[in-house]
Image (cartoon, helix red, strand yellow):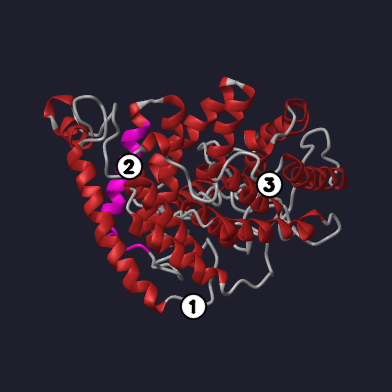
Amino acid sequence: MGDNVSKRLKLISATEAEMEERSFPNPYPDLDQGAFTSNSGAEEDYQEETFDAEGKVSAAFQKKVQNKIKDLLLQMEEGLKTADPHDFSTYTGWTGIALLYLQLHRESHEASHLQRALDYVKRAMRILNGRKVTFLCGDAGPLAVGAVVHHKLNNSADSKDCLSRLLQLQRSVLCSDSEMPDELLYGRAGYLYALLYINKEIGADTVDEETITKVVTVIMESGKNMSAEQKKTDRCPLLYEWHKKQYIGAAHGLAGIYYMLMQPSSKVHPDMLTELVRPCIDYVRHKKFRSGNFPSSVSNESDRLVHWCHGAPGVIHMLIMAHKVFKEDKYLKEAAECAEVIWQRGLLRKGYGICHGTAGNGYAFLALYKLTKEKKYLYRACKFAEWCLDYGTHGCRIPDRPYSLFEGMAGAIYYLSEIAQPEASCFPAFEL
């Protein structure tokens, strides 16, 4: 028995060491129960630095953020001179940079930012290869962002041309016997996002409902077929795999697909959501670790990853959307539990990016703040932004594409820009 106990202790300590290895200890006191005693005044100082007397993000903190954005933009532009000239993707290429400048234009209304967005999206459009169809990694990203940028510049003919080319991609998406996956990065959900993004940015019905319904239907039929094959129709009516694995997270997994299907603009009938999607949400919920985090795939028992792509920071968005759609408190309660994990383990050694970095994790707090209006979540979002203000000083790993939107500096800039209007924040290429 003693041997068994020592083995268990080894397992526990190894897991804790691994968690420690993947994230930095969070140095910030929380808003309510900080590390400092209330009579020391230190915690109040922390809060006063972040908030003004009305409970809004303070002008001093906003100024720090704006100054850092300017500084990082200069570094990013310099670094992009040596970036891969053939990477047109939103994820790590030119379209991601265009999307960043669109966001900066939304915040600042500076014409120069819109012009930069146009420059980068044109660069992307020259090198499309027709291999993938998603917003993040395929042709749909540059075409959708191109349509939006041209629309904002009143280049109507160019905008319509981009839209027409985007809609032509649906042939391969709707082919039910193709090898195309259904997830967000490389699959049908990633094409669906591009259509919904167009309707959000240009206007409802720019892409007609029939087109969206066709894409939604093929995603749902694919999920039903996989579920039947795996004999899980009762527990999880819509099941999906990527590379022979049933992933759970937002990028490659169930959470990202269900999140897209629950979007109001996907126009899935409420009965279908209740009968087919809701049991799937509960299926994912039951995979949760005791820590409150989620595994990367259905069969994985390792509680290691706290990323948007794998783990609680992606699943939280699915839970928030489930709460909005089904009006059940259990989903909000579990989203709040995800937020605790992210607060404890979300300052990642992997870097500051959006996909698997601190900025992407910060969006979890912004999403909960938008829903609940609880100041605690805005404070936490600001603290993760504060961490990003010290970009490059923590000894994080340097990503392969260090200036890109989803892996690198552009993503941190995008996140920092949200602090100006947190109520309007929107995780790029994911939230709508």
For the residue carrying disc 2, how many other residues have a C-alpha within 10 Å: few (<14), some (14-19), or many (20+)?
many
Residue 373: x and y in percent read: 39, 25
Magenta-colored span: 377-396
Of the image marks 3 and 2, the number of the one nearer the N terminus: 3
Decide which of 176, 343 is in the foreground and name it. 176
Of the image marks 1 and 2, the number of the one nearer the N terminus: 1
Q: Quadrant of the C terminus?
A: top right
- Closer to us: mark 1 or mark 3? 1
Q: Residue at x 49, y 36 (%)?
A: 338
Decide which of 152, 259 is in the foreground and name it. 152
Is 155 placed left or right of 280 in the picture?
Answer: left
Position of residue 81 relative to residue 242, above or below, is below
Of the image marks 1 and 3, the number of the one nearer the N terminus: 1
Residue 168: quadrant of the picture: bottom right
Q: CA distance from mark 1 to mark 2?
A: 31 Å
Q: CA distance from mark 1 to mark 3?
A: 37 Å
Residue 92 visible within the image: no
Is 262 placed left or right of 244 in the picture?
Answer: left
Is 413 placed left or right of 356 in the picture?
Answer: left
Say whether residue 392 is magenta: yes
Residue 136: quadrant of the picture: bottom right
Give the farthest residue toward the left.
Answer: 40
Q: Quadrant of the N terminus?
A: top right
Residue 21: assigned label: none
Magenta: main secondary structure equals helix
Q: What residue is shown with label 2?
A: 419
Q: What residue is shown with label 1?
A: 85
- Closer to us: mark 3 or mark 2? 2
Q: What residue is shown with label 3?
A: 298
